[in-house]
Each structure stands twice: as C-alpha cells, then as structure tokens.
Amino acid sequence: MDLRTLWQHDLAYSFRRSPVTIAAAVLTLLCVGGALLAPWIAPSNPFDAASLDLNAAFAPPGWSAQGSAGHPLGTDDQGRDLLSTILYGARISLGVGLASVLLAMLLGVMLGLVSGYVGGRADAFIMRIADIQLSFPPILIALLIDGVARVALPAGVQDSIAIPVLIFSIGISGWVQYARTVRGSTLVEKGKEYVQAARVIGRHPLAIMLRHVLPNVLGPVLVIATIHVATAIITEATLSFLGVGVPPTNPSLGTLIRIGNEFLLSGEWWITVFPGAALVTLVLAVNLLGDWLRDALNPKLR
C-alpha cells in the first residue's frame, strides 16, 4: 500500500475530517518528540549532580521580574531547570507507560486466546482470576506489588530496579481488559469456517491461535492499548506522587508534581503547575487519539 492509497483509506479520511484529532496528534508528537530529544533540546541535564546549583533554587519563570532567561519555566528546590526536568521526566513517564501497556497486552492477549480457544477448565480458571482482580482497583494492585517487591528485595538494589518493578506492577494490574476482549472475540472466531478448515487439515492448535485467530482479534486490542497508555501514565504519576514510584534521583512527572506540592502554599507554584500541565496535556492528547481510533474502527459508526 503506497502513501497515496494509505492517505485515501477510511482511517485517513476520518483523521482528516476531525480537527480535534489532528490537534491531539500534533500535541502527542510534540510531547513524545520533546521527551525523546530531551538530551539535545533540554537546556541542561537535571540528573547530573555536578550541575546542581542550590543558589538558583526557587527561581521563578523567566518572564517574571525575578526570573532568568536561562530558566524559562523557573527552577525547582534543588536549582534544576524546570523545563529540563519536565522533558526528562516525560521520558520516564512515557517509557513506563508504554512498557507496562506492552506487558499487559502480551499477557492479556495470550491468556485471552487460551481461554477462548481451549475453553473448559482453563477458561474457568483464567476468568475467575480476572473476576477476582476486577474487584480491586488497579492502583491498589500496583501498590501491593510494588510494596511486596520493596520488602522482598535488598535495600541496596531497590532504586536500581525501581523502574522495572513499576512497569511490572502496572502491567500486571491491566491485563484483564485485554484478556476479556480477546476471549470474546476468540469465541466468535473459532466457530468460523476458516478455523474449522485449519482443524481438518491437521494444523496444531497453537498454530491456529497464532496464525489464524490472533490477526482477527487484534483490532479491539489496539484500541484498548491506545487508551490504556494514558491510564498507565496516570497510574505511574499517582504512584510516584505517593512516593512509591521511580526514585527521586530520576524523577518522572508524578515525582515533580509531588515535589512541587510541598512548596505550593509558599508561593513557588510553578514547580507543580508546569509538570502538572505537561501531564494533563500528554494524557488528554493520547485519550483523544484513543477515542478517535475507537470510533473510526467501529463499523456501526461509519
């Protein structure tokens, strides 16, 4: 499919007809691009301890009378340039969100395929686990897994593996919606003629699930994954705000908001407002893209 054909596709037509979606895509590209290019476009490296200047702490934004042009969004309590910390923090938030969604999607799709195709006791066992997990809020499950990891692991390695533990805890808390969606689609697909034909010619059940059923159930999964990215970023920010996320030496947007919240009443509003605005902008843009993709792929709305 060439670029012209792709541009004339139904999805491209729907995208061009929605100014809100175009604006959301532009905002998402700006946020993702700023995070990826942070080492090159950020005024300084906020994670370099040698560059910290406590004398420059609590500097207001550059447009105010006491501000500095070198710090357009001001500085935090350690003298770090706030624009740089937001760009670097967005890298962590996006990385954790995308990785945890990928983990949840892989686990949920695998269990959903097995549950829907095999059926019987395997289906009952997987779905009962899913029902039990649905009775707990995802943030509570993530907190529980993170807390268990902190107790089980030595104190000396907790900071170094904090991000993988965070990815695992958020990913485990979000697999159920993928599994239930894939299971329902698999129950429909396994009764169709092409699956029956694959069984007749002796294809292995695993090959049927991966080569025949899986490609036909991925549409709703991609929509869920797009929306789940925003949820995962919010979950990471919540955990970091509560102090159980990434270590303070590598702050994400949630950590920056928590740090700024401590100084909000003393007048240093920019330390929490700007990271909070960046988080809201990123999550809103991703949610709008997810809503558009859900509507564009729904044949009933065409």
Image (cartoon, helix red, strand yellow):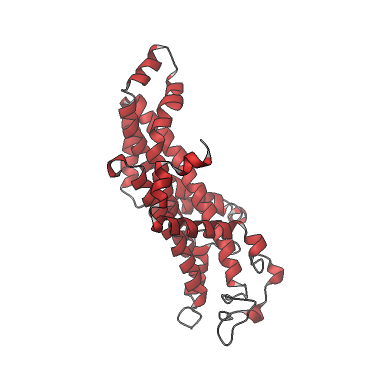
Residue 50: percent from left, percent from top? 72, 69
- Residue that sits furthest to the left in the current view: 300
Residue 113: percent from left, percent from top? 39, 30
Q: Is residue 151 positioned above or below 41 on the image?
A: above
Q: Nearer the viewer, residue 298 or 62?
A: 298
Instruction: Tell whether 206 sits left or right of 36.
Output: left
Q: Residue at x 32, y 36 (%)?
A: 127
Residue 108: percent from left, percent from top? 41, 38
Q: Nearer the viewer, residue 81 or 7?
A: 7
- For residue 242, say whether it is visible: no
Q: Residue at x 65, y 69 (%)?
A: 43
Q: How many marks?
A: 0
Residue 262: percent from left, percent from top? 48, 75
- For residue 300, say whether it is visible: yes
- Residue that sits furthest to the top in the current view: 201
- Residue that sits furthest to the bottom in the current view: 65
